[in-house]
Amino acid sequence: MEYNLLQKLKYASSLTAQEKHIVDFILNDPEVVFHSTAYELAQQTYTSASTIVRLCKKLGTKGYPDFQLKLALEYQQQPSSPLRTPDHTITEQGNVLAAIDSVPYLYHQALDETHRMLNAPVLVRIANWVKESARIDIYGSDMNYYLAQQACAKWNELGVAAVAHNGPNMHYLNTMNTSQFILSFVISHTGENSSMIEAARVLKNMQRKVIAVTENNLSTLSRHCDETLLTYGYNEQLRLSKMSSMISVLYLFDMLYMASISDNY
């Protein structure tokens, strides 16, 4: 049986999570395809233009323009539905309702991509360092400082000494007890934050174990650290990259926290 394009959208199988999200978005409002380029549709679905084009080909069309044309021809034959009101209040409600599905999708994507990039032996090695450490220091600026505070609060509840820092405190660093094993994490989304690089550089010069938490394992920060935990940032839209990066960082620290729970109970 030959399915038309709308049927293929409804019953498509073997789709990735991103492709399924795009399909659900289109089925919810097919007309969005007629008024959007592949890039614009990618922005609205928090995916990429290449993913849009790949989905179009998977559905049997030659690309996005061919997909637009075939869907438009089929859609004209469907029972007509009233046009949406241009009222601004309705538009705002629609954006909020879209976020109900989009936010969990972004969270899921951040978790999946971070999981995909995980290096299990490195994570196990760092978990062992956490177990052996007398104290944990976590460095981060701006939003990353608050993520550092959250991670430290969880470890402190277990009786594990952990302190968050929003930059290199030279007095603190110079008066550290060199006989103690202090494990340091340094968070920077790009790995090029000058303050965080300086903290890592000073710590390495003091022969401390330092872990970079960044999306770029070739960054300046990573080069000053013993190991790197890779984070994920949704780079198609800058404003959303912070949300994805935040979920990714929390996921990494929560895995180490869970390992600490198993050691303490």
Image (cartoon, helix red, strand yellow):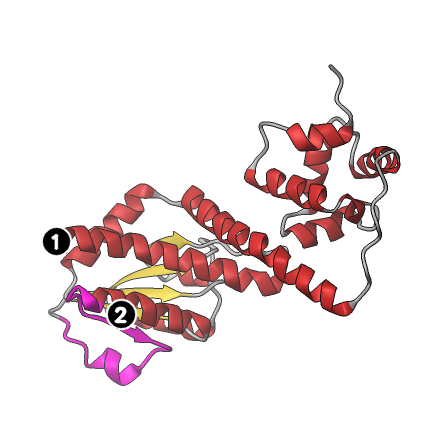
Identify the image quadrant of residue 141. bottom left
Identify the image quadrant of residue 115. top left
Is residue 178 toward the left or the right of residue 72 in the image? left
Q: Which residue is mark 2?
A: 153
What amino acid type is highlighted by mark number 2? Ala
190, above or below 104, in the image: below
Q: Secondary structure at mark 1?
A: loop
Q: Which residue is mark 1?
A: 265
Image quadrant containing the N terminus: top right
The answer to which of 70 and 100 lies nearer the viewer is 100
In the picture, the disc for residue 201 is: none
Identify the image quadrant of residue 171. bottom left
Where does the image place residue 260, in percent across and percent down from the top left?
A: 20, 55
Where does the image place residue 104, in percent across and percent down from the top left?
A: 51, 52
Name the residue located 25 percent from the left edge and 46 percent from the top edge.
Answer: 124
Where does the image place residue 164, in percent across and percent down from the top left?
A: 30, 74
Magenta span includes 257 = no
Where does the image place residue 224, in percent across and percent down from the top left?
A: 37, 62
Q: Which region shows up in magenta?
A: 156-178
155, above or below 13, in the image: below
